């Protein structure tokens, strides 16, 4: 389930960057910058969940485990 959410979030980041490019071309600089900031926050969130710890295990691998 979490992998599906992260995949959709990654696609949303790409779409936000595309939207920011379109807004920039239309002259809406403020909206474009807000979209870029939102895409950065979402991208960092995906990175937090997918980058492995020093032990080599990613947090997303542990998310599907049942709590004790």
Image: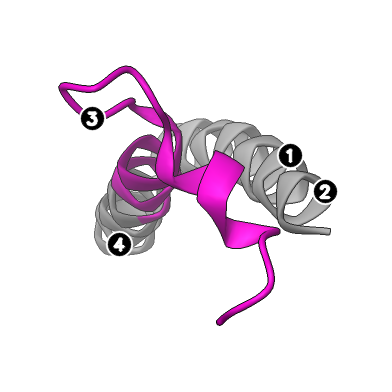
Marks 3,2: beta carbons within 8 A? no
- Element at label 4: helix
- Element at label 3: loop
Which label was assigned to residue 4? 2
Circle 1 crowding by C-alpha within 10 Å: few under 14, some 14–19, many from 20: few
Which label was assigned to residue 58? none
Q: Does the magenta stretch include residue 50?
A: yes
Quadrant hosting residue 47: top left
Q: Name, please, the residue furthest toward the left.
A: 54
Between disc 3 and disc 2, whose residue precedes?
2
Between disc 2 and disc 4, whose residue precedes?
2
Q: Name, please, the residue furthest toward the bottom.
A: 68
Q: Over which residues does the magenta segment extend?
A: 42-68
In the rendered view, tell whether residue 30 sits above or below residue 60.
Answer: below
Circle 2 crowding by C-alpha within 10 Å: few under 14, some 14–19, many from 20: few
Which label was assigned to residue 34? 4
Mark 1 vs mark 4: in front:
1
- Element at label 1: helix
Marks 2,1: beta carbons within 8 A? yes
Mark 3 vs mark 2: in front:
3
- Residue labelled with disc 3: 53
């Amino acid at each position: 389930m979490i992998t599906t959410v992260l995949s959709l979030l990654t696609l949303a980041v790409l779409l936000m960057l595309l939207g920011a490019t379109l807004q920039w071309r239309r002259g809406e600089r403020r909206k474009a910058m807000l979209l870029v900031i939102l895409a950065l926050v979402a991208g960092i969130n995906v990175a937090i969940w997918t980058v492995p710890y020093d032990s080599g295990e990613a947090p997303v691998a542990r998310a599907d485990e049942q709590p004790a």
